[in-house]
Image: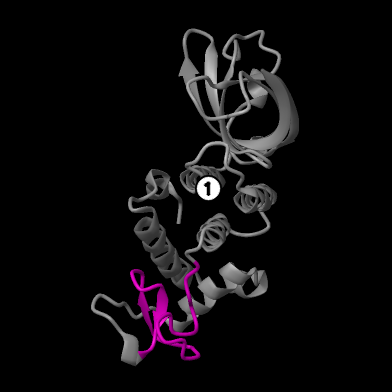
Amino acid sequence: MSLFRDDGVVLRTQKLGEADRIITLLTRQHGRVRAVARGVRRTKSKFGARLEPFSHVDVQFFSRGEELVGRHLALCTQVETITPYGSRIVDDYGRYTAATAMLETAERFTENEGEPAVQQYLLLIGALRTLATGEHDAPLVLDAFLLRSLSVNGYAPSFGDCAKCGIPGPNRFFSVQTGGALCPDCRVPGSVVPSPETLVLLGALLSGDWETADATEARHAREGSGLVAAYVQWHLERGLRSLRYVDR
């Protein structure tokens, strides 16, 4: 039996019994962790409100063994709020739906409990912080997060050079199944021809060029969102349920 501390983001909560909850968090050192929070649904709970989705928290866990994965879930014994991102997200539909899609993405990319996923954790913290400040449009922040999540998990798409032969871009064709932009010689059945501005936007979101991204026309942003959603669905093998509710 042991105690350990970590900071993490609350991804999801589930009711357990009459007053408890199972909390799913993406933590800095231990990856995705599921833990039981006793009595947090009672009105007198000391930290129930701190364990809500989007919250960045410092948590002390009690584990029955060294392994985080097994029959017995860890217990949340102490919780301190680091940043309550939810308070600046839940009142805005666009931010809320984008943030919900981010949490689902982070959970899907960290299916092995207890396995460190530092890059995914840092991406999520940065995306929630950017979303909460409102300095960029919520759909753009979401698409940037999705593209970077794909990249750190080994599925980085190409928006310039040909994904098959590597010939320098720009290349006008795009195939989700093949990995991104394609030259005319490598074009495959089912390829689409997005506008050049859309591919420039997606490349900017992947690289963090917000000056270019913020100056993009709405029609190109919408087209880009469709390509990103299709790319995510292909590599996750099933779509993100929350994407259907995102305000584009």
Magenta-colored span: 156-183
Answer left or right for 23 relative to 157.
Answer: right
Q: Is residue 190 above or below residue 43?
A: below
Above or below, 78 against 226 in this view is: above
Where the N terminus falls, by quadrant? Answer: top right
Residue 164: say if magenta: yes
Q: Is residue 48 left or right of residue 159?
A: right
Looking at the picture, how far across and down is residue 228, in whole percent? 43, 63
Q: Quadrant of residue 67?
A: top right
> Residue at 48% of width from left, 88% of height from top?
170
Toward the viewer: 163 or 212? 163
Q: Residue at x 66, y 37 (%)?
A: 8
- What residue did someone put label 1 on? 102
Residue beneath the point at 56% across and 57% down? 145
User: Is 237 colored magenta in this rendering?
Assistant: no
* Identity of the residue furthest to the left in this view: 189
**Residue 99, image quadrant:** top right
Please state, as top left, top right, bottom left or bottom right, where the C terminus lies in the image. bottom left
Which SS class for mark 1? helix
Nearest the camera: 75 or 49?
75
Q: What x and y, as percent, mark residue 104?
A: 48, 43
- Left or right, residue 33 beside residue 45: left
Q: Is residue 74 above or below residue 229?
A: above
Residue type at tag 1:
Met
Q: Residues within 10 Å of mark 1 (few under 14, many from 20)?
A: many
The part of the image, by quadrant, that contains residue 148 is: bottom right
Q: Measured from the top left, where is residue 32 in percent x and y?
A: 56, 38
